[in-house]
């Protein structure tokens, strides 16, 4: 792995989120949560894709920069940095997601300021840290492929191979858009979900996670309520996929092209907060 930043040992509560997706209202809401819970920026980690489907890419980048939290680059940041003409999301050519990306990615690319590009260029691709005696790695998708989609139903063999390559006990991942925590033998895979889009569960709230070392090692996956109506309205008045405006209100994705069969079957099934004790 290249471009890995080691942030040392973290203690107490660690706030995890990803997929801001240019959703300024959701970003403001997660900042409020951090303030309410007295979690300092040094204990906050973003799993990538600050930029995405919604209306405020540059404002989100500037807010994240000012906040001073730990970040990794998602595939969108990597492709913006490299001057690529698409988001690098691994969507099938001609699919609905691919068609939509040809709208939102050029929009985002046109809005990102030179100052924000300098910020993007400094974001590492991976983070390492130690927590409650466990070695942890933060990645976006996979190790070799930043855009690799890994869901709860994804083969345990695939996840075990990544753990072995990484040499860690806990992986904190992003990209997939649906939160889950999975114990695989001595390993733990945690995806806190994303805050920029709902989790396809028929609820407009989004998701984040907390790690806590006060009583062993605990992971909580929690809902985040934000001003989704305003975020939706901003999409409508800009040259962005209008289906995303509806998704922000209904909690249902326009399509399930990227999802394995198991996750497709959960569309519209409301999620609830989860608490996991990790070994």
Image: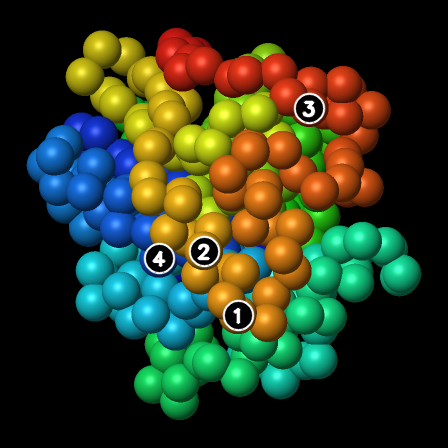
Which circle's residue, 1 or 2, is located before the other in the chain?
Answer: 2
Q: Nearer the viewer, mark 2 or mark 3?
A: 2
Tag shown at residue 233 = 2
Between 96 and 12, the one lying in front of the other is: 96
First in sequence: mark 4 vs mark 3: 4
* Lower position in the chain sequence, tag 2 or tag 4: 4
| Residue 122 shows in this picture | no
Judge from the rendering whether residue 100 lies leftward or rightward of residue 70; answer left or right. right
Q: CA distance from mark 1 to mark 2?
A: 9 Å
- Left or right of 205 on screen, residue 245: right
Kindly report the distance in space between the C-alpha atoms of the residues bearing marks 2 and 3. 24 Å
Q: What residue do we see at 33% from left, 40% from top? A: 226
Pointer 3: residues within 10 angstroms few (<14), some, or many (20+)? some
Numbered label attached to residue 238: 1
Q: Nearer the viewer, mark 2 or mark 4?
A: 2
Task: Residue 89: name its quadrant.
Answer: bottom right
Structural crowding at the residue carrying mark 1, measured as other residues with C-alpha within 10 Å and reported as few (<14), some (14–19) or many (≥20): few
Which residue is tagged 4?
24
Could you tell me how far apart the alpha carbons at marks 1 and 3 are, in whole angstroms? 27 Å
* In this rendering, the label closer to the viewer, 1 or 4: 1
Q: Nearer the viewer, mark 1 or mark 3?
A: 1
Q: Which mark is residue 267?
A: 3
């Amino acid at each position: 792995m290249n471009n890995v930043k080691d942030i040392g040992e973290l203690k107490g509560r660690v706030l995890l989120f990803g997929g801001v997706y240019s959703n300024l209202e959701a970003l403001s809401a997660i900042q409020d949560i951090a303030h309410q819970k007295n979690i300092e920026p040094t204990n906050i980690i973003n799993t990538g894709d600050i930029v995405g489907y919604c209306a405020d890419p540059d404002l989100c980048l500037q807010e994240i920069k000012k906040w001073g939290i730990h970040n990794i680059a998602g595939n969108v940041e990597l492709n913006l940095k490299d001057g690529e003409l698409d988001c690098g999301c691994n969507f099938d050519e001609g699919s609905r997601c691919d068609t939509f990306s040809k709208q939102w990615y050029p929009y985002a690319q046109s809005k990102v300021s030179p100052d924000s590009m300098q910020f993007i260029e400094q974001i590492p691709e991976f983070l390492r840290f130690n927590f409650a005696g466990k070695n942890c790695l933060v990645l976006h998708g996979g190790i070799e492929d930043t855009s690799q989609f890994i869901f709860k139903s994804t083969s345990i063999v695939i996840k075990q191979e990544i753990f072995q390559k990484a040499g860690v006990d806990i992986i904190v991942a992003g990209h997939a858009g649906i939160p889950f925590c999975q114990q695989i033998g001595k390993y733990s895979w945690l995806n806190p979900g994303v805050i920029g889009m709902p989790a396809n569960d028929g609820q407009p709230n989004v998701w984040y996670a907390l790690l806590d070392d006060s009583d062993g090692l605990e992971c909580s996956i929690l809902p985040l309520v934000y001003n989704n109506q305003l975020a939706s309205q901003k999409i409508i008045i800009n040259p962005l996929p209008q289906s995303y405006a509806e998704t922000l209100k209904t909690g249902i994705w326009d399509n399930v092209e990227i999802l394995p069969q198991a996750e497709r079957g959960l569309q519209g099934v409301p999620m609830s907060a989860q608490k996991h004790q990790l070994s």
